[in-house]
Structures are given as C-alpha cells and as structure tokens.
Image (cartoon, helix red, strand yellow):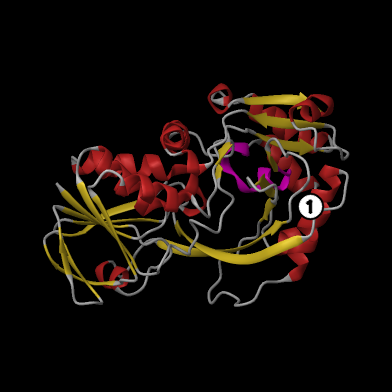
Amino acid sequence: MRVIVVGGGVVGTMHAWQAVERGHEVVQIEREAEARGASLRNFGQIWVSGRAGGEELDTALRARELWERIGAEVPGLGFRAIGSLTPVRNPREYAVAEAAVARPDAAARGYELVTAAEAREINPALRGAFEAALWCERDAAVEPRTAQLHLREALRATGRYTFLPGREVREVTGPGAVRDDHGDVHRGDAVVLATGAWLSGLVRELVPDLPVRRVRLQMMQTAPLGEPLTTSVADADSFRYYPAYKSAALDELNAGQAQAPIAAAHKMQLLMVQRQDGGLTIGDTHEYEHPFAFDTLEDPYEHLTEVVESFLGRPLPKIRHRWAGVYAQCTDTTRVVHRQQVADGVWLVTGPGGRGMTCSPAIAETTANELGW
C-alpha cells in the first residue's frame, strides 16, 4: 500500500510512522521547509493526568504506551517518564486534588496525593511554599522542537518513506490522489490530511462547515535552571481547565477562590517542563476569539513568572524565548479528534486541541486500524 500524508506536524508524522511500521510506503508532504506550528510550539508533555475519562483517557494511556515504545526505538525523541506534580496551597485546592485521587480511574492515571515533603523528595527543585501536591506517575515528556526531525530520520532509514517539504497541496484530483502547488500529482491507496491549524484553502473547500476552531496560546522558555526539574509542574488553575478534575470540590473552588485577574482574563494555567538543555518551557494562555492578536502580551508572562518563582523559591532564569502558537480544537471538546472521509480515498484528521502532542500516536493508530492498513 502507498499512503500520502499531508502535513509535517506530529499528527501527520505519527500517521506516517503507523503506515511504515505496517509495511507500507509513505510520501509525506509539508508546505513549509519544516513543520512550524503547534507540534513544535508546545510543552512536549505526554499529559495523562488531566484527561477526561472514557475515550479521551483511553486514547491518552494508549498514546503513553506508544510514546515509550517509539522513544526506545528513537532515542532522539528524548522520551522521559518524569510524571507531574501539581502543588496545592489551601484547603479548597487540596479538596480538588483529594477528589481526583478518589476517582475510579485514579490508579490508571497514577494519581497520588503527597505531602509537601514527599513532593520535594520527588522534585527537590520545588523549594517554595505549598501544603501538598497531586502526583501523576503516568505523565511524561519529549522534546517537541526536534521530535519530528528524529522520527523522520528513522522513517527514512526504512527505505519506504519520502518527505517532500515546501509544497502546498491544492487539489484532490481523484481517488487517493492530490496535486501540489508545483503541479505534481501524488497518488496512493489513501491520503490523510493532517493539516493541523491550517483550516483554509483545500480543507475549507472539502469541508465548508468543519466543526473545528483555532485556539491561540502564549508560552516562553528560559535559560538553563542550573538544576534538574525532575517532573512536569502545574498549578491549581489547571484544575479549572482539565476535565479530569470536575467535582463538587472544583465547583467550590471556582465559587470561593477566584483566579488572579490576569489569569482569568487570559484563561491561564501554569504548565512547566524542563528541556534537555536545562531550560524551562512555561505557559500558557488561551485565546478563542477571532481575529487573533498579532502580538504577545507581557502581563501573562509576568503572572507565570510570579507563580513559578513561588514554587521554586528562587528567581526564574533569564527568559530566552517568547512565542505564540495556534492549534485546532474540535468545537465539541469531548471529542478527541475530528476524523472524516472528505473524498474518495481521502481522510481529514484534525482538531485534537491541546491533546495533539499527547495523543498523536494513538490517534494515528486508530486511523490505521479504521482504514484497514
């Protein structure tokens, strides 16, 4: 079988991986010289802890298994089974963490409520003030800026993979066939459009009423911390954002403890991961209304800096990078992804939202299974 994958981000690359792993030939087409969207502009978190139960959690757990397996085959991914800690500072936040640990699926997520002292044994860099922490053993991390490069290198080594950058697919010309802006037609037994947040052009022509929206976020990265941050770190505002934490205790938190004004205005939470060079990737904000701003705002960065320093008990290293990114999210946020046959032999796979990096291997596996690869 010959598979054409359109899109060089992590979702597209994982579809290429699934096809090659199953013995097929793959041509992957990317409109940029390298992928430059949300697949790079993210935390690199394999984030199981906050996922909704049912299909979303099952997908995340399966993806976690696949990431670990692929990471063993491709060491350049930088797969690390580091887990995560969410420090809590008062009885309301503690109650939300306690409710999470009481969930029927808590064991599958690796949830444990630990004391502040136990949290510091797990992650000695957390020297700030907090009362306890929610530990999630199943969370992990990879290096988002280089993951696709190393995956493609491994795919090329099979002799059944071709990467064509700098080409924008413009037209479906027939069953399993597309034409790019160089005039070349690429034919296969299946075409997968994994175009991420690029929802215009061909995608709009094929699906005018696509139930997917775009979301913009801001993030930053620091110079090396100078010591290991042995886990990912979140703050209690993440309880408000992730569906796994819905409970009566969360209702009480929302009613009785307002977010900081800046955090509320920008729909913020803290997520933080250490990169292999020692720097910290920190975010994030959420912007849903179009048109998006073209500039980044300083107030959210100042808020995140304050929160991080309160957990670390020390000044944050110099900020070296600031950026904004845009991802595609199903308007029905309970759906893991939008997967639709849009023409004969052509499927569109988009809209995983902030789950894209986490769930991409399992999303691609499901596509492969459903298409009979």
Please provide percent x and percent y for residue 192.
26, 55
Q: Is residue 332 left or right of residue 191?
A: right
Please provide percent x and percent y for residue 135.
68, 30
Q: Secondary structure at mark 1?
A: loop
Q: Quadrant of the C terminus?
A: top left
Q: Which amino acid, mark 1?
A: Ala
Residue sitting at x 53%, y 77%: 291
Verify whether residue 240 appears in magenta.
yes
- Is 100 located above or below residue 261 in the figure? above
**Residue topped by disc 1:** 258
| Image quadrant assignment for residue 93 | top right
- Is 238 located above or below residue 204 in the figure? above
Q: Is residue 194 left or right of residue 307?
A: left
Residue sitting at x 79%, y 59%: 318
Verify whether residue 329 appears in magenta.
no
- Is 80 located above or below residue 200 in the figure? above
How many numbered marks have been drawn onto this rendered protein structure? 1
Q: Is residue 89 left or right of residue 222?
A: right
The one of 82 and 158 positioned closer to us in this rendering: 158
Residue sitting at x 47%, y 49%: 147
Q: What main secondary structure does the magenta stretch of the protein show?
A: helix
Q: Which residues are magenta?
A: 234-246
- Is 334 located above or below residue 97 in the figure? below
Please provide percent x and percent y for residue 262.
77, 63
The one of 306 and 99 positioned closer to us in this rendering: 306
Residue sitting at x 53%, y 74%: 290
Q: Is residue 170 left or right of residue 242?
A: left
The one of 216 and 21 positioned closer to us in this rendering: 21
Please provide percent x and percent y for residue 32.
40, 69
Mark 1 is surrounded, within 10 Å at the Cα level, by few (under 14), some (14 to 19) or many (20 or more) other residues, namely few
